[in-house]
Image (tube, grey):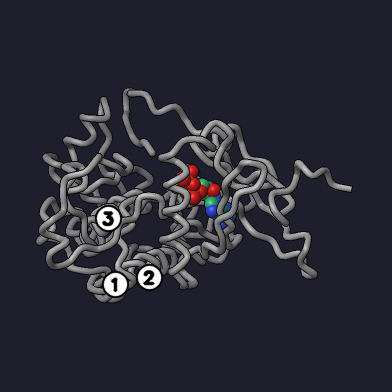
Amino acid sequence: MSKSRDFLGPYRLARLIRIGSTAEVWEAVDDTDMQKKRYALKILRPNYVNDKAELAALKHEFNVGKALNSPRIIKVIDHQTDKGRPFLVLELFSELNMKQALRQGPDSLAFMLDKIIEQAAEGLYYMHTKNWIHRDIKPDNYLVARDGETKLIDFTIAEPKRTGISKLLYKTKNIQGTRSYMSPEQIRGKLCDERSDLYSFGCMLFEMTTGKPPFTGQTPNDLLSKHINASVPSAVAHNKNVTTEFANLIKRLMAKKQDDRPPSVWEFLKEYRTLEIWRKRPRKPDISVFDDMGGTKSAEDLVKRPTGPTDDYEEET
Ligand SMILES: Nc1ncnc2c1ncn2[C@@H]1O[C@H](COP(=O)(O)OP(=O)(O)O)[C@@H](O)[C@H]1O
Ligand SMILES: [Mg+2]
């Protein structure tokens, strides 16, 4: 007989997938269901259950996700609280996020990157058609499966797209996002639109083709100032197998001015479908990054890395 502490609502916590800074993600089984359906539960960590901002963020993620219904986006099924622990019930999918895969180098996904990019863009496009700006597009927020199927997650800081009068009334807010992927306008606390997500998407494509984000810095501020001032690097300079055409498209996604970027994900996709990513098709690695996963993750994956300034400042969540 399972102990009741292993349950939240009808869900039996089967396996810890990942511990983030504020939430834990578990694989869970609905024991009341005949088919014993499996879900992912995103549960606030004990020290955050009374934190108003984190409670609101989880609720916000539910409110954004519940209206999104696409195979390219993780379904957000419910928001519940049990034993004082608020949690989201999510569709269970491959637990490997793209950042983890890229830690093994860009070759781990290169042989199926065409499919991954297509699906990653479709997820973002769908979100935009529902009038949401994601604002935290990065490799960590895409899950990828062995066959290249890709889904977008984590709507914690998504904002509604503003048009007309609400656009004019927008006031500069607290700056949120992940430094390695933030557009100049997001860094300045200005209004973000589809093109801000496209900027982040460009940074992500740079990393997926080269293994490194486009900018790093000595300090967090140094990194941010590079998004604003530094010239945009070309992926070709870091990986000779990237075609010039694709590297140029990535550069346009990362243009400093919104007007110089493709106007929508749809326009990006149209262009993307006409070109090749690679000069020479990459080989499938002998050891798949998916075979490394097992039930337990390495300590590095279980506990987020400290975010203090380092020599090569890369990321912050
Ligand atoms: N639906 C899911 N199925 C499987 N794994 C998931 C799912 N959602 C999240 N995860 C795992 O948990 C990690 C953190 O999820 P995320 O929603 O991005 O939380 P955080 O707000 O901490 O960034 C993901 O990178 C992934 O490894
Ligand atoms: Mg995340």
Q: Are marks 2 and 3 in contact (CB under 8 Å)?
A: no
Pick the residue in front: 84 or 163: 84
Residue depicted at x 41% and y 40%: 53
The crowd level at tag 2 (other Cα within 10 Å; few <14, some 14-19, many 20+) is: many
The quadrant of the image that shows the C terminus is: top left
Q: Is residue 103 above or below residue 235?
A: above
* Residue 88, quarter of picture: bottom right
- 76 left or right of 37? left
- Looking at the rendered structure, the kind of residue marked 2 is Glu
* CA distance for labels 2 and 3: 14 Å
Pick the residue in front: 175 or 180: 175
Circle 1 residue: 269
* CA distance for labels 1 and 3: 12 Å
Q: Are marks 2 and 1 in contact (CB under 8 Å)?
A: yes
The numbered mark at residue 250 is: none
Q: Where does the image place residue 97, in percent across and percent down from the top left? A: 50, 51
* Residue 3, quarter of picture: top right
Total marks in image: 3
Circle 2 residue: 122
Circle 3 residue: 202
- 121 left or right of 193? right
Q: Is residue 313 above or below residue 40?
A: above
- 82 left or right of 97? right
